[in-house]
Structures are given as C-alpha cells and as structure tokens.
Amino acid sequence: MPRASEHRSPAAQRHADTVRFVLFETRPAGLTFVQLVRSSELSPHQTRAGLACLRDIITERGWPPLIWTKKDGYKFCADPAQLQAYEIAIIRGKLT
C-alpha cells in the first residue's frame, strides 16, 4: 500500500511552497505556528498540510531539516550541534 506522502495533492504542494517561502524569509529565526499561519495567509489546516508535505519534500531532496522548538517555533536547521540537541530533546521526551 502506498504511503500517504506518495499521494500529495497539488494543493498540499502549493501550501508547502508557501510555508517554505515564509520560513526562508525569516531565517535564521523561527516562527511559532500562529505566526506561520498569519505570515503565510493560510488556514491552520492548510498550514499543517503544508508542513507535512514540506517535511516529505525535505527528505526527498536532502534539504536542511525543519525542526520545531518551544522557544523558536518552526525553522530550518543547518547547524549540526543544534540538530543534535533537537534530536536528543525529542528522544528524551519519548523516553519519559
């Protein structure tokens, strides 16, 4: 059975492009979900769909990962130390 990401709709891809563009404009800072919704002028549902599609696109193309932190919100991460700290925090959260 094909994965859901293999059936991306054209709308989800457009939302992913919008989210990516907004996040690139704010680099290196991040955006909270509410700020991302306002900046992209998408609905919350469209923004979530765009984020999900964007994560798949990032994986396929080998782009810098998209991370979320409570302090900074969503942002692209190219710094290996910051990415490692993010991954450790995620694993600790799952282990507790």
Image: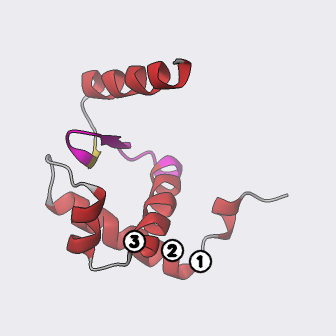
Whether pointer 1 and pointer 2 mark residues with C-beta atoms closer than 8 Å, the reply is yes
Closest to the camera, between mark 1 and mark 3, is 3
- For label 1, the residue is 9
**How many circles with numbers are drawn on the protein?**
3
- For label 2, the residue is 12
Mark 2, secondary structure of its residue: helix
N-terminal label among 1 and 3 = 1
What amino acid is found at the position of numbered circle 2 in the picture? Ala
**Image height of 64 relative to 46, above or below:** above
Q: Which of 60 and 56 lies nearest the eye of the viewer?
A: 56
Tell me the CA gap for discs 2 and 3. 13 Å
Identify the residue at the far front of this view. 96
Q: Residue at x 14, y 48 (%)?
A: 29
- For label 3, the residue is 44
Magenta range is: 59-73
Q: Residues within 10 Å of mark 1 (few under 14, many from 20)?
A: few
Q: Position of residue 7 (x, y in %)?
A: 68, 69
Q: Quadrant of the N terminus?
A: bottom right
Tell me the CA gap for discs 1 and 2. 5 Å
